[in-house]
Amino acid sequence: MQNEFGNVIFTDEDGQYWRICPEELTCEVVAINGENFARLQDTDEFLKDWTMRELVEQVRTMLGMPDAQRCYCLKIPATLGGAYALANIGTIDRAELISFSGHVAKQINDLPDGAQIRLKITD
């Protein structure tokens, strides 16, 4: 499953359901099996978080509908202080978003909450 902000839900070889959340720089187990995932999908909290309906409608009005290979994204991930605000939202290639998010998450994984970082963009 993929949502309009590039979040991905997939299963591993043990049948666990994982969620990649690029804006939060996370990849976490959300359900241990299909039965648990089915129950999770029926909760209002999950549906609200997964669809981000109000935000998606606002972004769609501002940016239009991205093509199939692209998705909406936070220009600065929430984990790094980026807001879920229209000024911080753009579009990006889905694969690039997942790659970037994993790369940054790996680099900051051992830092304590509130640590100061400097992003250095190189070719």
Image: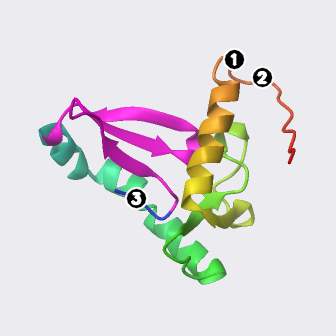
Q: Count neighbours of disc 2 (C-alpha within 10 A) and say few if under 14, some if 14 to 19, many if 20 or more.
A: few
- Judged left or right of residue 27, residue 60 is right
Identify the amino acid type marked 1.
Pro
At horizontal 73% and vertical 41% (from top left) the residue drawn is: 81
Disc number at residue 115? 2
> Counting residues from the N terminus, which is met first, the one under dot 2 or under dot 3?
3
Query: 97 or 58, which is in the foreground?
Result: 97
Q: Are marks 1 and 3 in contact (CB under 8 Å)?
A: no
* Secondary element at image label 2: loop
* Residue that numbered label 3 is attached to: 2
Identify the amino acid type marked 2.
Ala
- Residue 23: percent from left, percent from top: 59, 47
Q: Nearer the viewer, mark 2 or mark 3?
A: 3
- Residue 49: percent from left, percent from top: 41, 52
The range drawn in magenta is: 5-34
* Residue that numbered label 1 is attached to: 112
* Secondary element at image label 1: loop
Asked if residue 52 is positioned above or below residue 83 in the image, the reply reads below
